Image (tube, rainbow, N blue to C red):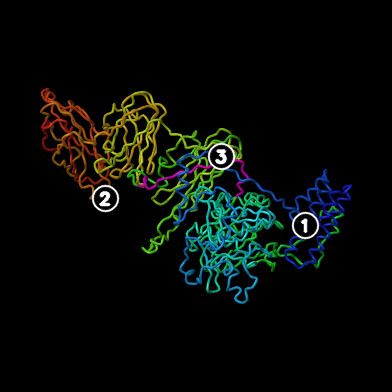
Amino acid sequence: MSSDLHSRAEASSRNEALQMTIDAAEAALRAMKLTKNPNEKVKHSTLFKQLLQEAEEIKFSKDWRATSVNAVTTNPQNRAVAVRELKEPQSTRELPTSERILLLRASYLNNCKFPPWTTPPTPNEFQLANGGDLFIDAQELFLSDFQEDVLDDWKRPSEALPPPSWFPGDRTNLGPSMSFARKIDLVQDAATDCSVVASLCAGVARAERGHSKILRTVLYPYDNENNRPLMSKNGQYVVRLNFNGCYRRISIDDRLPVSNTGRVIHVVDRHNPGLLWPALIEKAYLKVQGGYDFPGSNSATDLWILTGWIPEQVFLQSDDLDPDHFWKRISNAFSIGDVLITMGTGKMTAKTERELGLAGEHDYAVLDLREVDGQRLLLIKNPWCEGTSWRGKTKQKSHVNVQPNADLAELSLIDFGEDATPLESSRDLLNADDQLSPGTFWMDLDNVIQHFESIYLNWNPGLFACRQDLHFSWDLSKANNELTSSRGSSASLVRHPQFAITAGGKGNVWVLLWRHFRNCIPSGATDQEISEGRYTIDLQGHIALAAFTSRGRRLLLPEKQVEQGWFVDSPQTLLKLSDCKPGVVHTIVPLEQDLADAEHTFTLSIFSDTPVTLTEADPRSRYSSTLSAAWTKDTAGGNAHSPTYPSNPQFVIVVPQKTSLCLLLETRDEDLNVHVKLVHSKGQRVQAVRNRDIVFDSREYRKACCIAESMEVEPGRYTVICSTFEANQLGDFSLTVESSQPIQVVQLPKEGAGRLKMELSVATFGGDCSKIAAPLVPKRLVNLYAIARQLDVASRRGASAGSLLRMSIESGRGPMRRIHIASNEGEYADCIGDVRSDDIDLSPEMLRRGESLWIVLDRMYTSTDAREERFAVELFLDQPEALACGVWRTWDD
C-alpha cells in the first residue's frame, strides 16, 4: 500500500492521480472485508475513508499534486517516526554557597546519603576484585507486613529471576538478562507501587514506538554500543534519579526480595520474566522512598524522578478542561515522543470497581494514542499482574456506509455492498484483539474524562532552550510559633518566599516548584521502629504556585494574581505562563496548605524559550517595622459604627518627611475580620472618627489580614486604629508599617490609661422615663470623658430590641440650656455597646457664673414596650478628687 501512495504522488496528471487513489481505496475495501483481525479492520476502514476524502480533494483542488503528496506524510498508518533527541537544558544560574549547602543537606534521607550527581561511574566500579565478595548495600529496604510474611529471602538475580514460583522446575539457562526477546510487559504484584510501574511502562512504550530510550541515562553500568544496561560483575549498580533539587547518585546491590509463595514482591516482566533492569530501577527508587512498603504516589512525580521530564497534572473534572484542545495538545506531542502520559483514578466503591473493571486510587499507563473513525482512543495499561480491564461498551454500533457525491462518477462504483458486515465501534473492535495483554484496553477520551480523576503529563525538557534553578528553604515552624501569623487561605504573603522572573524575549515560561523529600516519624511507630530508622516521607499538605505582575516586588496579599495553579498533594506543581513579553517581570509566590510545622526545602525551576532572569523579589519598601498587640475585653471595640470603636488598639505614627506608607494588619485567627485605618489626630488617641479625618484605610473588612496604603503621605502625626468587625472579639495581632522614609511607630496607651476612673451610681430608667440626669460639681480644672454601658445585656437576648441612647454634658435648663458635648456627635446610638463622649474640660468657674452642670442620659424607645433599663456610667478624670457627682433624677428640658 505504501508504494501505491508514492506512485500517486508521482502521477503525471490529475486524472491519473484520481484513478490511482480510487484503485488504492478499492484495495483497502477488499482488505477490510477479507481480514478477521479487529485491528486490521479498523486500519483498513480508516485508510479507505481517507482515500475517499483525498479523491474528492484531487478532483476539486487546484493544487492536486500537493494533495497527493500530503497523503503520504499525514497518513498515520504509513508515517515513519523520526528518532530525535532534544537536549535537556541546564541551569546557568550560579549557585550561592547557601544554596549549595542546602543541596548537600538534602542528600540525607532514610538514613542514607544520596549525593548530587557529578559524572557517570567508571567501569571499574562494577568489577569484582580477585577474591572479593559481591557488593552488599549497608541499607536493607523495609518491607510491608504482608511482604514480610511471604518473604523467602533476599536473593541475587541468578536465584530471583525468573521468579521461582513461575519456573519451579529445572532453571537451567533461565538466568537473569538485560536484554529481551519479546515485547516488554511490566507488572506489579505484591507491592503498592503502581505509580512506579506505570511510569516504567510509559517509558518503555515510548521506546517501542521508535523514540529514543530515555531510561538509558538512569542505570549503570551501561553498554553504549548495544544501547542497553550491562550486568554488574560485583553486584553493585548505580542509578541516577532526580529529586531534592538535582540529579543524585543512588547505589544499590542486586539482591531482590523473593517470595515463598506465588506472589512476586518486585516488578517483573510478564513476557520476559528474566529481565533484570526494571527491578533494579524500582529498587533504587524505593530506596529513596524508604522501602518496598512504599504507599505509592502519582506517576507524574515518579517520571520526574526517573527521567527529569517536567510533570503536569490535569484535573479531568475541571470546568476549564476543553477536551478538543486537550486532545490536540497531547496527541501531537505524543506522536513525536515529547510527552509521557499516565492516569489516575479517584476513590471508588467496591461495587463501582467491579462494574467498571477499574481500580480506585490507582495509576495506569498510556501506551498509545489513536484517532479512528472520529473516536479519540487511548491504549491504557493496568500495571497490576492480575489487573482487570475496563468493561465499557458502545451502546450503538457504528455502520460504515459511504455515499459518494453524485458528481463523482468515478467514486460511485465503490460500495460496501448489501452483504457487507457492519462494523462495531472502533474502540470495541480494538479491544476484541486477542493480542492485547491482560489488563490492557482501549478507552475513548469521553470515558477517560468520566471515569478517571487526573491525567499526568511529563514533558520533554528539551522542548525548552533555557532553564534556571533556585533552591530555598521555608521555615514554617518559625511562622507557626509567631502568635500573630496565620497560614490559612486568607493569610498574608509576608512570610512566603517570593521570586521575580523576567523573560528576555517573547515566549512561554513554565515554572515548576518541587518540594524536597524529608523524613518524619510515622504515626503510631514503635520505639523499636524508630531506633531502626523506619522513617516515612512527609507527604502532608498541599502546594501551589501563583504569578503576579508587581514589577518584581514582594506582595502582601494573595489577590489579583495573573495565574494560579491548583493546590496539589504532589511534591511538584507546575504553573505555565504563555506568551510572556520581553522585559515583563512576574512575581512568583509558592503557596501552601497544611504543610507540617517544620522547615521545608524546595527548588524552583524555570523552563523557557528564551533566557530568563531569576532572582528573589525586591522588598516593597526600604523601611519596615512590626509591633505586636491584642484585642482584649477592654480593647475589642468593633467596627467604626460601634460606639466602642475608639477603645480599639491605636498607634501613633510620626512622619518627618513625605513618604509612602503601607499598613499591614495580621492576626492568627482566620475567623476574625479585620480593618486598619489611618486618621489625622495630631498623634492623640482618637475618640471619634469623622470622614474628613480619614487619610486612608483598608476599605472592606477582610479575614485574617488586611492592608491600607498610600504612595504619598505628608509630614505629620497620625493615629492608626486596628479593629475587628464585631465588638468583643479577642485575639492577638501584629501591625507592620512599611515606608520609603524613616518613621516612628508607637502604640498608644489603652482607653483610660493614665486616667482615674470614677464610677457613678447605677443610672436607672423607669418604665415610662426617657431622660435622667445627675449634677456634676468640678472642684478644680479637670479633663474628663464619660462612658455609659448598659447592664443586664444578657437578659435582653431574644427579646425585642433595646433603646437608643445619647449621653451629654449640659448646663442650664429650658431656654438657657447649653450642650457642651454629646456622644456620637449628638446622634442616638445602640446602647448594646458602649456610648461615650469626647474629652471636655470642666472648671469651678463654670459654676460661679451661675451655671449648673449635668450629665444627661437620653433614651429613645425602639419598641412599643417601655421597660426599665439600667446603665453603668464611668468618668475618666485626669485629676484625683477634682469632681463630685450627685444622684440620678428624672429630667425634663
Q: Which mark is residue 47?
A: 1
Residue at 81%, 55% in the rendered image: 2
Do residues under tags 2 and 1 come within 8 Å of each other at their CB atoms?
no
Looking at the picture, which amino acid does disc 2 mark? Answer: Arg
Residues in magenta, as a range: 459-480
Residue closer to the observer: 504 or 19: 504
Determine which of the numbered discs, if any, sits on residue 92 in the image. Answer: 3
Which class describes the residues within 10 Å of circle 3: few (<14), some (14-19), or many (20+)? few
Determine the image quadrant of residue 757.
Answer: top left
Task: Find numbered disc 3 in the image and state the secondary structure of the residue it sits on.
Answer: loop
Mark 1 is on which residue type? Answer: Leu
Question: Is residue 460 part of the magenta span, yes or no?
Answer: yes
Q: Is residue 892 above or below residue 434?
A: above
Q: Label 2, secondary structure: give it.
A: loop
The image's mark for residue 724 is none
Q: Is residue 467 magenta?
A: yes
- CA–CA distance in space, label 1 to label 3: 49 Å
Locate residue 336, reporting x and y percent.
68, 50
On the rendered image, what quadrant is the C terminus found in?
A: top left
In the foreground, 310 or 653? 310
Of labels 2 and 1, earlier in sequence is 1
Dot 3 or dot 2, earlier in sequence:
3
